[in-house]
Amino acid sequence: MHELSLCQDLIDQVTELARKHRAKSVACVKVQIGQLAGVEPLLLESAFTIARAGTVAEQAEMITEVVAPCVLCNTCGAESEVTPSNLLCLACGGNNTRLIRGDELILARVELVVDD
């Protein structure tokens, strides 16, 4: 399950942020997952529960936001939010498109708990 190795990388990033900001713990981690990223949100959330054990993020909640694919048409210049199985331009129907969103995995937000 590659989601576990992804979560271990996320925990490394979160741990570094917590260290940098002198946080005592992490309350929440939000990630954006493109529908074409090859990552299953439920598996990622389950793997996060395993990866966070014994870390500064041990009690952290994970929020996942699924991002729909978006293409840019090289013919007419339109941007279209499309489905994973149909990457055609919605404006002109052309297939000369470039994926500009929907294959990413982004650490979007981290909520840290710091002492006052």
Image (cartoon, grey):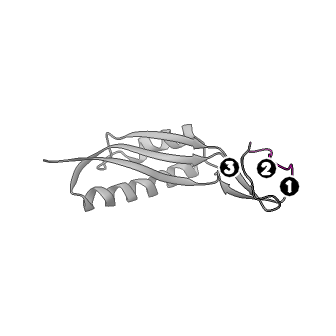
Amino acid type at image mark 3:
Leu
- Residue in front for this viewpoint, 35 or 73: 73
Quadrant in the picture for residue 85:
top right
Q: In this view, does 39 lie to the left or right of 70?
A: left
Q: Which of marks 3 and 2 is in front?
A: 2
Q: Residue 36 carries which label?
A: 3
Q: Upstream in the sequence, badge 3 or badge 2?
A: 3
Does residue 36 belong to the magenta stretch?
no
What is the magenta range?
83-95
Q: How many labels does the image show?
A: 3
**Which kind of residue does numbered mark 2 sit on?**
Leu
Mark in front: 3 vs 1: 1
Q: Percent x, y for residue 65?
A: 53, 41
Q: Which residue is drawn at 37% across and 46% down?
A: 52
Using a 10 Å C-alpha cutoff, classify the residue at mark 3 as few (fewer than 14 neighbours), some (14 to 19) or many (20 or more).
many
Q: Does 49 appear above or below 74?
A: above
Give residue 95's mark: 1
**Image coordinates for residue 93, horizontal then vertical, percent:** 86, 49
- Distance between the alpha carbons at the discs numbered 1 and 2: 7 Å
Left or right: residue 43 compared with residue 60? right
Q: How crowded is mark 2: few (under 14 residues within 10 Å), some or many (20 or more)?
A: many
What's under tag 1, amino acid-wise? Asn
Q: What element carries label 1?
A: loop
Tell me the CA gap for discs 3 and 2.
Answer: 11 Å
What residue sits right under mark 2 in the picture?
87
Of label 1 and label 2, which has the lower sequence position? 2
Tell me if label 1 and label 2 are in contact, CB under 8 Å.
yes
Residue at mark 3 to residue at mark 1: CA–CA distance: 17 Å
Q: Residue 110 carries which label?
A: none
Judging depth in this view, the residue of 55 and 107 nearest the camera is 107
**In terms of secondary structure, where does tag 3 sit?**
loop
For marks 3 and 1 on the same chain, the one whose residue lies earlier in the sequence: 3
